[in-house]
Image: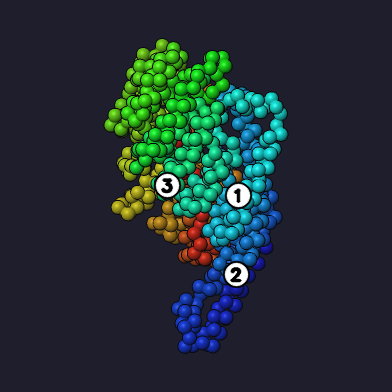
């Protein structure tokens, strides 16, 4: 349907709805219904326009070539239409589920191929972000509207899991033997497990505790980092349910011959360092995964649960040592020594009956352990277990080790680590450590990552002047700088509106410096429009028009799921990655605001996107704003992952 025909239909609907309302007023001049109608004569007309928008969009989505977009639009249209046309909405949910199944199946296949390719190339798993769980999106919206429909979808998902398990059982005997000989990596579970736990965590964060538990239970039969993080989050909402599931997981881990020190490291997070997991691999690599900024001990941990952990941990850590050339565990001897050394002070305190054997095991492993573990100087041994005050000089201690390093490569690696530790705390000394690296390539790749961490920390701490200084002087990309300026503007808009307006103009200039074919240009300009609406509504209409023009120059712009991220990765030095959602770069907020101010102008602008994805996202935002339906935000939580050699 072309734009002029669409607008004519909207105007026609407004006229007819107004006539109907007028007739109703004449027929019932004294009735309660008539009184409500007179109070807001245009509201029903606006609702009918929004419903028409959604109906047309859902029909259009059936022909989208992008199956992901087809599923998302149909699901969101169904959610929005539920109160006005439940039957149609239910049919749309089912269509969305069918499309999502196709997308998820292909995403999982591709992820597994990428993971296996990386393993063959480097012998270790890389950091891969789990693909978007489209079935999870559909399920969340359906559960909010109809629990029976959600149960139907859960049943289909369970059937799919059974089929995948059956398919896996038909693999070659050699492949099975290889899998049986090697400890699974708890940080990289099978993709279907990762998706199930990711969905459960989202449901939990949204307050849907019962459905979150139901969805997670099938993935809590093995020890995974995401599973333990889910249980830690669940404990904050339902302590008994979390402790019960953790105790059951302990029993399974203790009986599993493939459990090793990495398993114990993950399990220890629940008892002592929620949302922080540290795994040391037998090949020398270290994975540090932190899901919360501040790590504090869990409240009210029952002595029986803690005792069950120590019993299981000791059972695994004290297993007979295999010959070095026969060791197939993920942790290996280095990881086993690290885990015992990290936990043995806790055994001494809470379970001293196991301590003598553990000390003896450490002595047997000592020849294979690095010096910093043997002499206790590694902060990894106490990270999360010691207070912030006790750990505040970690970056300096790493830098001092760098000065004593035997090789240039080791020294550069330690300085890089010191810089990352300092930057994560917002310590400006991170720059000093970067400059001590004598490899220009490493310096040039690390400096932007450090500056991004520093400016992000300053924004989080609401340190406006420091954030602004870093936004101006830091080695940031254009989109990172624009984002930082917009966040500073947000912090200042109430206290210093004139200064905030000036900073937003700087952000707009920075956004325009992004290449015309880069989707980040459209994202940043959308962010400018979003912030502009907060301080200058007439200018916001101009700003979104500029953003739409940029979006129409790049087919990769989707209008949603924007994030701001940075990554540092070099061979032999490892990988560090951080990201958080950037909602202001998405079209939903600005179009919801514009729709409430001028519905038909907002519709016209939404229809002016030439690509299906941003056009659909904008139309959905307009319609949901008029119908007062909360727009779902299926965004990634802020996360930091470090993986070092």
First in sequence: mark 2 or mark 3? Answer: 2
Task: Determine whether 59 is above or below 424 in the image.
Answer: below
Image position, residue 62 (x, y; %)? 68, 56
Front-most of residues 442 and 299: 299
Does residue 114 show up? yes
Q: Nearer the viewer, mark 2 or mark 3?
A: 3
Query: Mark 1 or mark 3, which is nearer the start of the sequence?
Result: 1
For residue 135, side relative to residue 307 (left or right)? right
Crowding around mark 2 (Cα neighbors within 10 Å: few <14, some 14 to 19, many 20+) is many
Answer yes or no: do the residues labelled 2 and 3 have beta carbons within 8 Å?
no
Which residue is at a point 49% across and 83% down the rendered structure image?
A: 34
Residue at x 64% of width, y 64% of height? 88
**Mark drawn on residue 379:** none
Q: Which residue is mark 1?
A: 135
Where disc 3 sits, the SS reads helix
Q: Secondary structure at mark 1?
A: helix
Label 1 with label 2: CB-CB less than 8 Å: no
Residue 10 shows which numbered tag?
2
Q: Label 3, label 1: how many angstroms apart (C-alpha)?
A: 29 Å
């Amino acid at each position: 349907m072309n734009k002029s025909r669409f607008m004519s239909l909207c105007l026609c609907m407004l006229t007819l709805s107004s006539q109907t309302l007028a007739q109703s007023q004449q027929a019932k001049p004294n009735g309660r219904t008539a009184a409500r109608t007179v109070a807001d004569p245009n509201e029903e007309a606006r609702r009918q326009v929004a419903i028409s928008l959604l109906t047309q969009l859902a029909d259009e989505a059936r022909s989208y070539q992008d199956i992901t977009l087809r599923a998302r639009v149909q699901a969101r249209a169904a959610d929005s239409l539920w109160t006005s046309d439940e039957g149609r909405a239910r049919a749309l949910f089912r269509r969305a589920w069918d499309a999502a199944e196709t997308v998820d199946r292909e995403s999982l296949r591709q992820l597994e191929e990428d993971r296996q390719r990386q393993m063959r190339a480097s012998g270790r798993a890389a950091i891969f972000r789990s693909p978007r769980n489209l079935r999870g999106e559909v399920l969340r919206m359906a559960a909010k509207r109809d629990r029976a429909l959600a149960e139907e979808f859960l049943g289909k998902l369970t059937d799919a899991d059974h089929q995948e398990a059956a398919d896996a059982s038909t693999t070659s005997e050699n492949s099975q033997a290889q899998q049986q000989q090697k400890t699974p990596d708890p940080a990289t579970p099978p993709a279907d497990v990762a998706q199930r736990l990711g969905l459960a965590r989202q449901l939990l964060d949204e307050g849907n505790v019962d459905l979150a538990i139901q969805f997670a239970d099938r993935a809590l039969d093995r020890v995974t980092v995401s599973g333990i993080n889910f249980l830690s989050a669940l404990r904050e909402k339902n302590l008994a349910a979390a402790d019960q599931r953790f105790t059951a997981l302990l029993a399974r881990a203790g009986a599993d011959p493939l459990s090793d020190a990495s398993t114990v490291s993950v399990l220890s997070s629940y008892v002592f360092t929620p949302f922080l997991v540290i795994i040391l691999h037998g090949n020398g690599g270290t994975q540090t995964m932190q899901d919360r900024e501040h790590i504090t001990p869990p409240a009210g941990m029952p002595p029986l649960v803690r005792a069950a952990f120590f019993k299981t941990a000791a059972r695994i850590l004290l297993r007979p040592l295999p010959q070095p050339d026969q060791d197939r565990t993920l942790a290996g001897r280095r990881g086993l020594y690290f885990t015992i050394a990290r936990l043995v002070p806790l055994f001494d305190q809470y379970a001293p009956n196991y301590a003598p054997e553990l000390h003896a095991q450490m002595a047997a492993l000592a020849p294979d352990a690095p010096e910093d573990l043997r002499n206790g100087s590694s902060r990894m041994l106490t990270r999360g277990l010691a207070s912030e005050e006790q750990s505040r000089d970690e970056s300096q201690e790493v830098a001092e080790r760098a000065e004593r390093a035997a090789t240039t490569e080791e020294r550069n690696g330690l300085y890089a680590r010191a810089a990352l530790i300092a930057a994560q705390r917002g310590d400006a000394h991170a720059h000093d450590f970067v400059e001590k690296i004598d490899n220009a390539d490493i310096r040039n790749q690390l400096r932007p990552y450090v500056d991004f961490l520093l400016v992000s920390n300053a924004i989080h701490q609401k340190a406006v002047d420091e954030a602004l200084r870093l936004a101006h002087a830091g080695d940031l990309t254009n989109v990172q700088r624009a984002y930082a300026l917009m966040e500073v503007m947000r912090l200042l808009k109430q206290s210093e509106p004139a200064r905030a307006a000036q900073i937003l103009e700087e952000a707009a200039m920075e956004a325009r410096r992004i290449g015309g074919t880069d989707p980040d240009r459209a994202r940043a300009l959308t962010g400018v429009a979003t912030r502009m609406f907060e301080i200058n509504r007439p200018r916001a209409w101009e700003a979104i028009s500029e953003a739409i023009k940029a979006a129409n120059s790049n087919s990769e712009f989707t209008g949603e799921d924007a994030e701001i991220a940075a990554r540092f990765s070099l061979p032999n030095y490892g990988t560090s990655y951080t990201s958080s959602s950037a909602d202001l770069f998405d079209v939903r907020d600005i179009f919801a605001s514009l729709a409430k101010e001028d519905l038909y102008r907002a519709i016209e602008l939404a229809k002016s996107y030439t690509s299906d994805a941003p056009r659909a996202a904008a139309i959905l935002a307009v319609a949901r704003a008029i119908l007062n339906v909360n727009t779902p935000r299926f965004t990634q939580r802020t996360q930091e992952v470090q993986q070092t050699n």
